[in-house]
Amino acid sequence: MRIAVVAPSCTLKREAAERVTAIAAERGDCEVMIHPQCFLSDGHFAGADAQRLAALREVMADPQIDCVWFARGGYGSNRIAEAALADLPPAARTKSYIGYSDGGFLLAGLHRAGHEVAHGPMPQDVLRDGGEAAVTRALDWMVRRDASALEPGIQAPAFAFNLTVLSSLLGTPLEPDLTGADLLIEEVSEQHYRIDRLMFHLTASANVRSVARIRLGRVGDIPANDPVFGRDELAIVTDWCARSGIAFGGRADIGHDAANRVVPFGQTTP
Amino acid sequence: MRIAVVAPSCTLKREAAERVTAIAAERGDCEVMIHPQCFLSDGHFAGADAQRLAALREVMADPQIDCVWFARGGYGSNRIAEAALADLPPAARTKSYIGYSDGGFLLAGLHRAGHEVAHGPMPQDVLRDGGEAAVTRALDWMVRRDASALEPGIQAPAFAFNLTVLSSLLGTPLEPDLTGADLLIEEVSEQHYRIDRLMFHLTASANVRSVARIRLGRVGDIPANDPVFGRDELAIVTDWCARSGIAFGGRADIGHDAANRVVPFGQTTP
């Protein structure tokens, strides 16, 4: 199992790269190759659009690579997603793709184009408290589709998205078909009023209203609201589900943390 | 000319209410009536949804009122916009509506429903440096459709929106038809990477791609980006316009500041 790490969004920390390659070497069942593009820096991004796109297209086209692993989130994969999906080489279809957060733009587009994709921990997550377990979980899914890595409640077709990313996908050529979906959402570093506005946007969408249910992952690192918003993320999400006639399916075991579980997109799960 | 002030979003400051009613009294050509709902507070909002909705519906239905003026922005008008537009009383159609920022949710919905609406300064703006001129500009438009209050470059059909609000409108029942529009956008308190993501979302929309041109108002109070984003709002907007084949029409004289000009929606301008 050969896993290539590229960074379509922000720059990967070298310490994370070293620890993840060491974990893979210790396992002995996979080889993690960190593309040098991961360490580039161009303002906000891990290199200019053309550099991030070239690295991604390179590993997608490489028949020796079994899995493409997004290095980390941040922001920027949307800027290269459409170009990444144009004239896909045959080798791109024989591999799987894993990441989350900003990587959701690419996951959505790759899934639409018929590729196997999954929401799951990324190499930079190794730097979190308990991050080795997160990375191991992702590798367990990549190497042997280990069912224990999966979010325990998912019912196919499942999707998992950062709330802001999903809102930004609506109406774009990357938007997933959510008909009948078990839709898992999570968020980080957004105030409660923003979460409320995002849920307004999401639940007004006919596509989102076609889901089987929405489940709420963790919403981490919420900046203070001034004045205090007056209701928490669970109350916000259940309120908008009720207003829009969408079934709320309870909490989901995903989020910007080391406990984040794997959610393969769309397909029937083991 | 009787002008009713209600607060569909956040609570109006009493000092602003006093100064605005004094300005109107001094003019002698209009009467500004501050609805007591403006001073309610329920968490983030100027009263609960039901209270904000009731005040708005009350002044919409009042045949003695010529103009409904939104007290201020913040967040929350989207939560009551659909209900505000249901079963509109005939008196609602004989008046005009003015506001901006979060008020854009209501302006969009009211415009769709055939009402006369305009982006323009709000009562709370009187507290800004030079705020008396902003409020006077709004009153000049309300009272006598003074052309000097208008954004000088607008070509009908024109629309003006806060970028985040317009992004949150896409795909909802409130979304305006932007065909052939002179679309003016402005933003406040959003980091450059967020502005970039909003422009990705906007310019992917077929509706937004049908505009005649996009013009960029002011983007104020931009929080620091870590790392530095590497391009400013003008570069971001021109880049996404170029990528999506939308004409960029230059800068616009609107924003979250005292210089903010009036943009009547849709209609032929004087």
Image (cartoon, coloured by chain):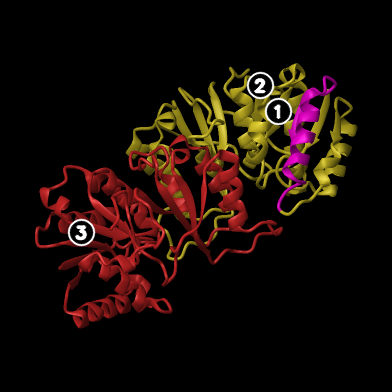
Chain colours: A yellow, B red
Based on the picture, tell me whether residue A60 belongs to the magenta stretch: yes
- Residue tagged by mark 1? A97
Q: Amino acid at mark 1?
A: Tyr
Query: Toward which corner of the image does residue A240 lie, by quadrant?
Result: top left
Query: Cα distance, mark 1 to mark 2?
Result: 8 Å
Determine the residue positioned at 38% across, 61% down: B44
The chain letter for the residue carrying disc 1 is: A
At x 67%, y 32%, the residue is A83
Residue B180 to residue B44: above or below: above
**Residues in magenta, as a range:** A44-71
Q: Nearer the viewer, residue B256 or A20?
A: B256
Marks 2 and 3 sit apart, C-alpha to C-alpha, by 52 Å
**What residue is shown with label 3?**
B55
Q: Earlier in the sequence, mark 1 or mark 2?
A: 1
Q: How many marks?
A: 3
**Amino acid type at image mark 2:** His
Q: Residues within 10 Å of mark 3 (few under 14, many from 20)?
A: some
Residue A230 at what x, y percent from top left?
40, 58
Res. A230 visible in picture: yes
Q: Are the residues at dot 1 and dot 2 in contact (C-beta closer than 8 Å)? A: yes
From the viewer's side, name the closer residue of A218 and B95: B95
Q: Chain of mark 2?
A: A
Quadrant for the N terminus of chain B in the image: bottom left
Tell me the amino acid under the disc marked 3. Answer: Ala
- At x 70%, y 37%, the residue is A121
**Subunit ID for the residue under disc 3:** B
Disc 2 secondary structure class: loop
Residue A100 left/right relative to A58: left
Q: Which label was assigned to residue A115?
A: 2
Dot 1: element: strand
Residue B178 found in image quarter: top left
